[in-house]
Amino acid sequence: MKRVVDLVTSVCGLVVLSPLLALISLAIWAQDRKNPFYTAPRMGKGNTGFSMIKFRSMVHNADKTGVDSTGNNDARITGLGSFLRRFKIDELPQLINVLRGEMSLVGPRPNVEREVRLYSSEEMHLLDVRPGITDIASIVFADEGDILENKSDPDIAYNQLIRPGKSSLGLFYVRNQSIFVDIKILALTARNSIDRQKALSGVAVLLKSLNAPIDLVTMSTREQPLVPSPPPGLTEIVTSRD
């Protein structure tokens, strides 16, 4: 059933949004006459690699720097790219990945191979399902760029501050996925672009309804500062990139 919903929605979405997608593509190309799309290598279901399609939000060849995590003050981000990233518009081309069966509308966000190699045995269960365009963690950590801004090493900061919560929420989704949950997450994702606080409150309500651990619910409200912690399945805080 989930695959049928993904297939129908991706086809309809690509048809309806085609004029907007074409306009955005032209605007990005007009900046530097370079490819408006960026194909990002990611790891999907079963730890299988695939090319995730995004609108390019950085300067051409920005991925050659070897830094995976990005703060809002990253000099590689273009002016238009900053706008696209803020409203997650750069993710729209991933409807093509959904159509291909490489991704789903809802599921844990796909990661790069280098980061997947750091996964604990518990985190590897994130690869039991198709990765998604959005999930609970996408809402809770929609301000990822702000969190990583001005960090001396964005990759280490990501692994210490964001990865633990993101992986925990992803694993909770894997254990509790359903069409109902997917619909709620999609609705909350849309709400997040309008009213973040109400979206976070909605996430907390959803987690409580699924009997999530209280610490996961508390973390999802983002009312407390993020502190370095070990990812699920590990006992030590990450202190290096590898």
Image: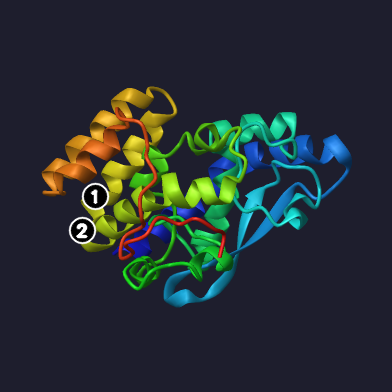
Compare residues 215 and 210 and report the one nearer the observer.
215
Residue 90 versus residue 66 in the image, above or below: above
- Measured as percent of width and height from the top left, residue 223 is found at 29, 27
The image quadrant that residue 50 belongs to is bottom right
In the picture, the quarter occupied by the N terminus is bottom left
Compare residues 128 and 153 and report the one nearer the observer.
153
Q: Kindly state the secondary structure of the residue where label 2 is placed.
A: helix
Amino acid bearing label 1: Val
Task: Answer left or right for 1 relative to 33.
Answer: left
The residue carrying mark 1 is 181
Which-is-in-front pick, marks 1 and 2?
A: 2
Compare residues 87 and 217 and report the one nearer the observer.
217
Neighbor class of circle 1 (other Cα within 10 Å; few <14, some 14-19, many 20+) is some
The image quadrant that residue 6 belongs to is bottom left
First in sequence: mark 1 or mark 2? Answer: 2
- Measured as percent of width and height from the top left, residue 102 is found at 50, 67
Q: Kindly state the secondary structure of the residue where label 1 is placed.
A: helix
Neighbor class of circle 2 (other Cα within 10 Å; few <14, some 14-19, many 20+) is few
Residue 176's disc is 2
Whole-number angstrom distance, CA of label 1 to CA of label 2: 8 Å
Q: Are marks 1 and 2 in contact (CB under 8 Å)?
A: yes
Task: Answer left or right for 204 relative to 145.
Answer: left
Residue drawn at x 32%, y 32% is: 222
Residue 50's disc is none
Residue drawn at x 44%, y 61% is: 131
- Measured as percent of width and height from the top left, residue 8 is found at 42, 56
Amino acid bearing label 2: Asn
Residue drawn at x 31%, y 69% is: 122
